[in-house]
Amino acid sequence: MRIVDLRSDTVTMPTPAMRKAMYEAELGDDVYGEDPTVNRLEEAVAERLGKEAGLFVVSGTMGNLVSLLTHCPRGGELILGDQAHIFYYEAGGISALGGGHVHTVPNLPNGMMDPAAVEDAIRAPGNAHFPRTCLICLENTHNRCGGAVLSVEQMAEIKAVAERHGLPVHLDGARIWNAAVALGVAPSDLAAQVDTIQTCFSKGLAAPVGSAIVGSRAFIDEARRNRKIVGGGMRQAGVIAAAALVALDEMVDRLADDHANARLLAERLAEIPGYDVDLATVQSNIIRFGLTRSDVTAPQVAAALTAEGIKVNASDAAHIRAVTHYGIERDDVLYALEVAERVMQSVAVA
Ligand code: TLP
């Protein structure tokens, strides 16, 4: 059976150039700071995002956790969108391991938080009843908001609130590269609106493993220690950093193709009776769509699509997520649409 895997851009396989770079990578012990390939990657990603220093970590989850551990003392309160990946999908790491206290603010459908609501959530200092606010977190592109892209101006609005209260801002920029390509701006223009960023090489950029944290030199020095605490000090990590370097150099511009494919998928899906697609929310490589039928649930339709080879995930009872990525061509999208039409006609009534 023909398979079109739209579950996530995490399913991407490394390119031939990545495999070659991994084979040939110059290596050393990175805990001694002696892996030249890791060092090159950390410098390259920091430079690309306009920050002083970078730190290679295993995953996006570890990148966010180590960043939050570095920003927040035990009992410190972090302000997060209620749809944030950090809040939803990272196993509560900052409270389990760092004693962090999470304060959510509603995410708007466009991935933004109302700046006034963020400001309201900041605790008045000096009152012994309150936890102390230590950080505001943003996400761009926004996963659960269907890949919505925050503009430089939107991010600047949150930065202005943070600055008024002397707070840092951390960006879960797992897909900051998609955001920059969608907006036609430099990734560093987005990064300039925040203090620290976690970004992934293993999503749309198709590297097999790895993320980086970037920020000031002092922040990264402290984060390096926290990475060690969570067991993330790797040794000859250049073998994976080599693929991440290829990802940065060769895989960013092509994200525009993924965005075009997502747009095509969304526009045509919207024409098929049964699917409910809000085209305004399709801004990058993620499509989050609902159903116009009430006799079947999103998990049932997702399972029926998957059984026919179109692999998608239900993100809740009413929504399905499809993600385009390296390895998915226009022809795969057209085939997925054909199957989607057939599945919607035949899916059993609950
Ligand atoms: N997201 C995954 C799943 O965890 C849901 C996906 O398939 O999209 N931040 C954001 C915004 C993410 O989307 C992800 C991964 C992460 C962080 C975590 O990255 P990893 O999976 O490397 O720990």
Image (spheres, rainbow, N blue to C red):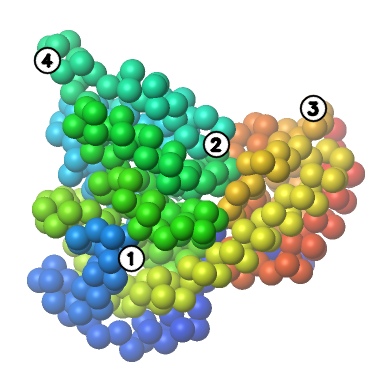
Is tag 2's residue or tag 1's residue first in the polypeptide sequence? Answer: 1
Query: Is the CB atom of the residue marked by disc 4 within 8 angstroms of ligand 1's nearest atom?
Result: no
Gap in angstroms between the C-alphas marked 2 and 1: 26 Å
| Residue placed under numbered mark 2 in the picture | 110
| Residue placed under numbered mark 1 in the picture | 48
Q: In the image, what residue occupies the spot 44% across and 39% down?
A: 154
- In the image, 269: left or right of 284? right
Gap in angstroms between the C-alphas marked 3 and 2: 25 Å
Q: In the image, what residue occupies the spot 58% across and 53% down?
A: 284
Using a 10 Å C-alpha cutoff, classify the residue at mark 1 as few (fewer than 14 neighbours), some (14 to 19) or many (20 or more). some
Say how many tags the image has: 4
The spot of residue 258 in percent (x, y) is 61, 62
Gap in angstroms between the C-alphas marked 4 and 2: 34 Å
Is tag 4's residue or tag 1's residue first in the polypeptide sequence? Answer: 1
| Residue placed under numbered mark 3 in the picture | 294
| Residue placed under numbered mark 4 in the picture | 126
Using a 10 Å C-alpha cutoff, classify the residue at mark 2 as few (fewer than 14 neighbours), some (14 to 19) or many (20 or more). some
Helix, strand or loop for disc 4: loop
The spot of residue 20 in percent (x, y) is 42, 87
Tell me the number on the disc at residue 334.
none
Helix, strand or loop for disc 3: loop
